[in-house]
Amino acid sequence: MQQRVRLLRPFLRRTSTAAAATVPFRRLMHHAAESSSRTLPQASLVPVLAALAAAATGVTLADGKKDNTSNDSTSAYVNWSATHDCHPVRVYEPESVAEVESIVAFHHLQKTKLRPMGSGVSPNGLGFSDESILVLSRLDNILHVDEELQQVTVEGGVIVGDLLARLRTHGLTLQNVASIREQTIAGVTQAGCHGTGASIPPMEEQIVSMDIVTPANGRLTLNDPSDPRFQLAKCGLGALGVVTQLTLQCVRRHYLVENTQVMSISQLRQVHPSLLKSNQHVRYMWLPYTSSVVVVTSNPSTSPDLPADHTKVSADVDHRLRPLRLLYADLARTSPPSSWRFTQLRDALYALDPLNPAHIARITQVEVEYWRRSQGTRVALSDDVVGFDCGGQQLVSEVAFPMSNGSSTDLDFMEALLARIQADHVPAHTPIEQRWTARSRAALSPAHSAEDATLFSWVGIILYLQDADDTRAATQAYFAEYSKLLEDVMAPYGATEHWAKLEVQSKSQEEIEALRTRLSARFPAWKAFKTLRDEWDPNHVLSNEFVDVLVR
């Protein structure tokens, strides 16, 4: 894990652009050339910066020529699925909070854009901007671990995977994490990311205290749960300030006993309420065009040993993969490499005809047998279990919706979605993943609720991307239609999109207006968020196109 994370370390440097298809999965790739300068901005830019020069000395900058019409800009940054890129005119990499304050103050005075950005992994390019960008890659220190209070204080640029590794040495871990670990801790909380667990809230609820640098009010410390500003800033989309420091509530390091089983939908309906109540973590992997659901449950343990009454997941990978390998050999007229993991094999099968509903349905029906052969139990440290292999480059959309106690709203939603997929002959790739969290007090969290007992279900759809340019373009165009289908299904359920997976670029003006109306109705504090943004950032310096389009 640490080696993978280190590959991301120099993730914002001056680069030349390469084709999107060459960007490896989950890496913010620097293509051919790399250079950076540890100098102040050019004198022609900043007469006003003279007043800030002392504080700003040493800020790392990467200057590139702005070019919105071609891929020849000297600075290009790409998200992990190569679906979004940006060509910023300047990238700041400050080494101290004082430098962050100087940079933010300069852009506030100049009324020029400065977008805070994390690791750049968001599927919708939430942190991207073609103007100036500020990243905290050099502010990635773990400042203090309090084992007694089970709290950790970190700088905003620390990578989640690094933090988890360090916490292990103190006998601690995070209560919940998202499925991938390459995000910065500031980015993952500002975007409202989540794990799974009916009694566990999204990640921003682990914030005990935060330091945020605002354009108009400077550096602020927020730590009072009753302060509306704190609840607005915890999931602030990077639009209220630059999050430079966080104190997070942790839990004791523990193991999870993870059990995987395949159920029919009718079987699941009978046991679903008890599964949510009796397991710490629950996620379902729905398989369209079948009647099967993969049910994954996890519960804490103090021991790394398999419980006596559980059957271990088969170690015979060849046996588990055999049905999919045979299908690949039949369709491709050649045997697949024996080194391919399940996700690689599935992706390769999709690539043969990725938008053909009959082809995709056939793969999914065979996939059921893979999961039947993969049933059983494993035990591992909690952060190794909660994270999982999501497959290759992909397009994703995810929504969250509230459930009332004892209701079957979540299963009703899924059956409605599966029915539309079948009726519309959608080539739905797998899995359609369903998870649950407790509510969040953060005002803009998709799981926000004023009621402590409210449970939220999260559902995500997916299409995997292929290397061929024409196939990628066709898949991206089709996914826009697939997402509209999800919007149709979610409307009666009061669902809200995940901030890092909400696409606005492909929407018409009419659709944007409808989205603004829906967001305003969903979030009681929507107006308060806009008011606070106007107070802390009156020139909207920190907002990119995504934020400016939605928050009006």
Image (spheres, rainbow, N blue to C red):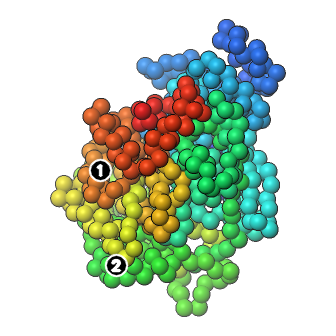
Query: In terms of image quadrants, where is residue 221?
Result: top right
Residue 361: x %, y % from top left = 26, 62
Give the left or right position of residue 147, taking residue 159 as reference: right
Give the left or right position of residue 13, taking residue 458 as reference: right
- Marks 1 and 2 in Cβ contact (< 8 Å): no
Residue at image point 37% right, 82% down: 271
Q: Nearer the viewer, mark 1 or mark 2?
A: 1
Q: Residues within 10 Å of mark 1 (few under 14, many from 20)?
A: some
Q: Which corner quadrant holds the N terminus?
A: bottom right
Residue 144 disc label: none
421, 495: nearer the viewer: 495
20, 417: nearer the viewer: 417
Residue at image point 36% right, 48% down: 521
Q: Residues within 10 Å of mark 2 (few under 14, many from 20)?
A: some
Give the left or right position of residue 532, taking residue 98 as reference: left
40, 347: nearer the viewer: 40
Residue at image point 30% right, 56% down: 490
- Mark yes or no: residue 197 visible: no
Circle 1: residue type:
Glu
Residue 518: x %, y % from top left = 34, 46
Q: Residue furthest top?
A: 44
User: As displayed, is residue 409 above or below residue 542?
Assistant: below
The secondary structure type at the circle numbered 2 is helix
- Mark yes or no: residue 143 visible: yes
Q: Which residue is mark 2?
A: 268
Query: In terms of image quadrants, where is residue 251?
Result: bottom right
Residue 88: x %, y % from top left = 56, 25
Q: Which residue is mark 1?
A: 487
Q: Residue furthest left?
A: 423
Circle 2: residue type:
Leu
Residue 341: x %, y % from top left = 49, 62
